[in-house]
Image (spheres, helix red, strand yellow):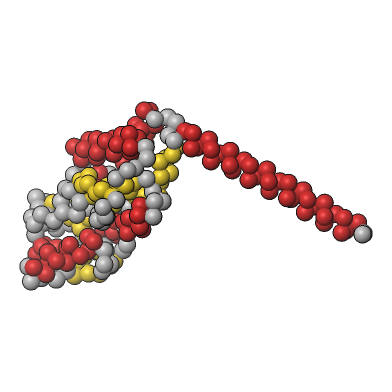
Amino acid sequence: MNVTERGMRLYEEIDRIFSGVDQISQAVETIRQEDRGHLTIGMMPAIPGSLIAQVVHNFAKKYPDVYLSFHIRSSQFVVDGIFGRKFDFGIVLKPLEHDQFKTTILDDAPLMAAIPSGHLLQNKSSLSVADLCSHPFIGYPKGNASRQALDKLVTSKGMALNFILEATTANMLIEFVSQNLGIAVVHPIQCLKQVTGVTFIPLKDTLTLPIHVVRPISARRDATIDEFLSLFMQELKESRSYSC
């Protein structure tokens, strides 16, 4: 055996040893997190990061040893993850109808119009469907729950929206509005944050898209889940009291 072959064998042996050490470290970390308590949360992307951060801040004061893991994905993905037991609970638009899971409404405030600051509609106390249809409109793609609800309302009035742009997230819709590209209709939870160049106005026709929490009927760590949701509702209420 030449020096090169011996060197390669030595390298492979050292690599095997270090790989084993890494696996042990990962196992120790997993056990440590389990001892602390671990909540895995699925959440739709429409929830403002500032709201989540404040809830986590308050939660950590009461449960400093609980490890939180957030997965921000579409409502359908989160619901599928809850059904597959990947998440302890989820905050979504789409409820899960199954006898092993319970769905409750966290919030059902009506949708709001988002318009550029200084727009012709800015001084109105509320906007009609005719108002929405009379200006360039930015909305979600077809198939989105908000888009379906809005399309149903507009069609019932015998009108049509003047779509010029589509986006898959509320943040992108609002960014387009802030650049004076058009108006949009968004979930009221988006009004909790101040957005430069955007004004939020209620709709004359009440249009709601409730936010749900979905969790297994026999969930582990029920007390910590209840506390997280209680803090979420409290922060949502307080944020709404000085917004919009």
- Across and down, in percent, residue 41 comes to 37, 46
| Residue 205 occupies quadrant | bottom left
**Residue nearest the viewer, comparing 12 with 120:** 12
Look at 32% across and 59% down and name the residue there: 76
**Residue nearest the viewer, comparing 167 with 4:** 4
Q: Is residue 117 left or right of residue 76?
A: left
Location of the C terminus by quadrant is top left
Look at 22% across and 60% down and name the residue there: 146
For residue 185, above or below residue 225: below
- Across and down, in percent, residue 71 comes to 40, 50
| Residue 143 occupies quadrant | bottom left
Is residue 102 in view? yes
For residue 21, above or below residue 73: above
Location of the N terminus by quadrant is bottom right
**Residue nearest the viewer, comparing 56 with 77:** 77
- Across and down, in percent, residue 59 comes to 35, 33
Look at 82% across and 55% down and name the residue there: 9
**Residue nearest the viewer, comparing 240 with 102:** 102
| Residue 21 occupies quadrant | top right
Look at 19% across and 54% down and name the residue there: 209
- Across and down, in percent, residue 174 comes to 28, 55
Q: Is residue 7 left or right of residue 40?
A: right
